[in-house]
Amino acid sequence: MADAATSGIPAREEDASAAVVPASMEPRPVQAKLGVRTTLRALRHRNFQLFFSGQFVSLCGTWMQSVAQDWLVYRLTGSALLMSLVAFAGQIPVLLLSPVAGIVADRRNRQYTVIATQTFSMLIALTLAALTLLKVVKVWEIVILATSLGIVNAFDVPARQSFIIEMVGREDLLNAIALNSSMYNAARVIGPAIAGIVIAGIGEGWCFFGNGVSYIAVIAGLFAMRVAPRELQRGGSAVENIVEGFRFARHTAPIKSLLLMVGLVSMTTMPIMVLMPIFADRILHGGARGLGWLVGSAGIGALLGGLTLASKRDVKGLGSWVWTAAAGVGVASIFFAASRHFWFSVAFLLPAGFAMMVQMGSCNTLIQVMVPDRLRGRVMSVYSMMLIGVGPIGALAAGALANRIGAPWTVSICGIASIAGAAAFAVKWPAFRGAARELISQQGIAAASPATVVSNNSPEAGS
């Protein structure tokens, strides 16, 4: 299951959307106050606490299922192309259905939408567990169940991403997104490690069963939340609303460039995850436990990247983080592809995970602080299309390419593409900074929080 979000109504939240006070009128302390309270400040919201705890349990199960499913397909077929096909089937529905899902996120109660999607995800996991434990599972059944989960995720991701601001308000939005990603990647460390042990000991089916049971935690947390009523989007046909969201994303230069970067990095990093069982078994000779170590290492790096974002008090400089991190993903991918030593490969995935998390998290945050509330669900549906929907296209192409030239060369080509995209973004982004600052200001958010600015006459705004 993907990460979920919730909404909160803390006592201080009524000030979150207040107009931004001009920087010249704000007091400037000598130095920023950073620490644990700053890094975890979004957890002061009760609904985010419920979300964080329940979602963490569920995400550990999700990563167990992800690793186990990849290994099961590899064990049954040994084919890179079929592994890519399963990944394609599980994620292509996001590309096709996200525009409709964005309308649902804007027109329906997001809390109930997420409860529904999590319930369906639980049923799919338990079905896969039953088929596997009874030893009757076939590859075509895995493809169908992966497609079903992809359909659910198409509606789940925009609703959850849009739900974050209802949970914590504008003032803690950046921190909540970063903590949400950190939680996702902490589970990415724990889940694969458990999966490697379980697969080697009692089989993949119990990983699927564990994931199914883990959904109970997040569903219970969602039901326990007290969410303030939200004015739902009304007026216009569904087609008109979809077109409006796409038009905003397409014609708003900073958001368009960020979405393209999300799509590029998604397309170039997905092959690494899809081809990971081949690296773990055939190239590095680590087996199922080795697969758990490799995925877990990337997760540790991503966790550190999320915590780095969480410690940041404002969005100043995030535009530069986007292209720097994208280039870092490419470089680390090339080194990983060239390695033939297991522990070197584990080490190279650490910075790859860190850079990928920083890139994705920075893009997510910048988009969320620039988009108007009335368009949030639809724009985040485009974000989910680029994050999840285009990945399977890259995975399917990489699977076919890996069958011809091998997994290492395929991953190296993806790394080069990521570096090229980072260079293009670095050249174009300075021209979009002014528009980005204006959009952020229109949403009532300061690009740089005065409470974190050192008194050095540096510009307040900037992304």
Image: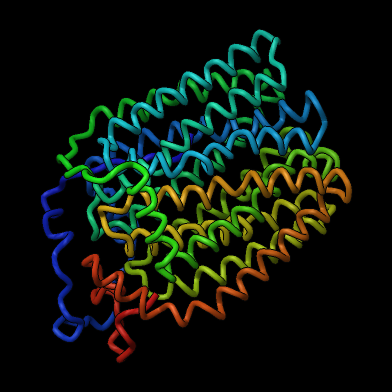
Q: Position of residue 272 (x, y in %)?
A: 70, 49
Q: Is residue 319 visible?
A: yes
Q: Position of residue 274 (x, y in %)?
A: 70, 42
**In the rendered view, does 163 fall on the left or right side of 278?**
left
Q: Residue at x 61, y 48 (%)?
A: 391
In the figure, 99 relative to 364: above or below?
Answer: above
What is the number of callouts on the image?
Answer: 0
**In the rendered view, does 288 fall on the left or right side of 165?**
right
Q: Nearer the viewer, residue 244 or 126?
A: 244
**In the rendered view, does 435 fall on the left or right side of 171?**
right
Q: Residue at x 59, y 49 (%)?
A: 390
In the figure, 84 relative to 242: above or below?
Answer: above
Q: Position of residue 439 (x, y in %)?
A: 30, 70
Q: Is residue 308 visible?
A: no
**In the rendered view, does 257 fall on the left or right side of 437?**
right
In the rendered image, which quarter is residue 207 located in? top right
Which image quadrant: the C terminus? bottom left
Q: Residue at x 52, y 29 (%)?
A: 149
Q: Position of residue 320 (x, y in %)?
A: 49, 75
Q: Nearer the viewer, residue 250 or 408?
A: 250
